[in-house]
Image (cartoon, grey):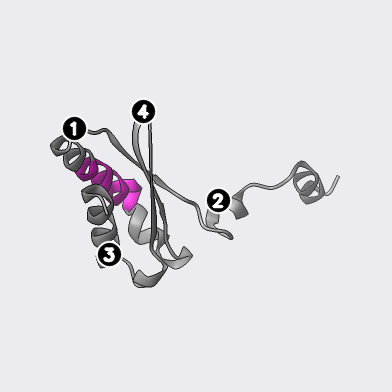
Amino acid sequence: MERDHAFIEYVVKALVDNPDAVNVVRSVDEMGVLLTLTVHPDDMGKIIGKDGATAKALRILLRVVGMKNNARVNLKINEPVGGKREREFKSVDEAVDGLGV
């Protein structure tokens, strides 16, 4: 396991209530390293933080880890199924029906 992968997994598991649900996938391409993080839906607030502060801090720390290994490291946080964003957006039909027109 690479250092960046081990680092983010360790930190996220320490933050969440469901550490067994934490999944980190590492992929490398010409743009650098991409770590894709998936957590339990109940833990999304802890990972994002107030105004995204926790997620921003995680990304900054990952960049520091990447600099030590001469790599550009980015973090993508997957939105869980049934998450808040999924409920916010409606289809056009649902929006029209909601207007009562």
In space, the residues marked 3 and 4 are separated at their CA atoms by 28 Å
Identified by mark 1, the residue type is Asn
Secondary structure at numbered mark 2: helix
Identified by mark 4, the residue type is Met
Of labels 3 and 4, earlier in sequence is 3
Quarter placement of the C terminus: top right
Provide the residue designation for mark 4: 31
Q: Position of residue 87 (x, y in %)?
A: 61, 55
Question: Do the numbered discs 1 and 2 sit on residues whose CB atoms are within 8 Å?
Answer: no
Provide the residue designation for mark 1: 70
Of labels 4 and 1, earlier in sequence is 4
Residue shown at 60% from the left, 52% from the top: 86
Q: Residues within 10 Å of mark 3 (few under 14, many from 20)?
A: few
| Comparing labels 4 and 2, the label whose residue is closer to the camera | 4
Q: Nearer the viewer, residue 59 or 42?
A: 59
Q: Residues within 10 Å of mark 4 (few under 14, many from 20)?
A: few
Residue shown at 54% from the left, 56% from the top: 84
* Total marks in image: 4
Of labels 3 and 1, earlier in sequence is 3
Quarter placement of the N terminus: bottom left
What is the residue that sits farthest to the right in this orientation?
A: 101
Provide the residue designation for mark 2: 85
Provide the residue designation for mark 3: 15
Is 79 one of the magenta-colored residues? Answer: no
| Comparing labels 3 and 1, the label whose residue is closer to the camera | 1
| Comparing labels 3 and 4, the label whose residue is closer to the camera | 4
Q: Residues within 10 Å of mark 1 (few under 14, many from 20)?
A: few
Identified by mark 2, the residue type is Arg
Question: Do the numbered discs 4 and 2 sit on residues whose CB atoms are within 8 Å?
Answer: no
Secondary structure at numbered mark 4: loop
| Comparing labels 1 and 2, the label whose residue is closer to the camera | 1
Of labels 2 and 3, earlier in sequence is 3
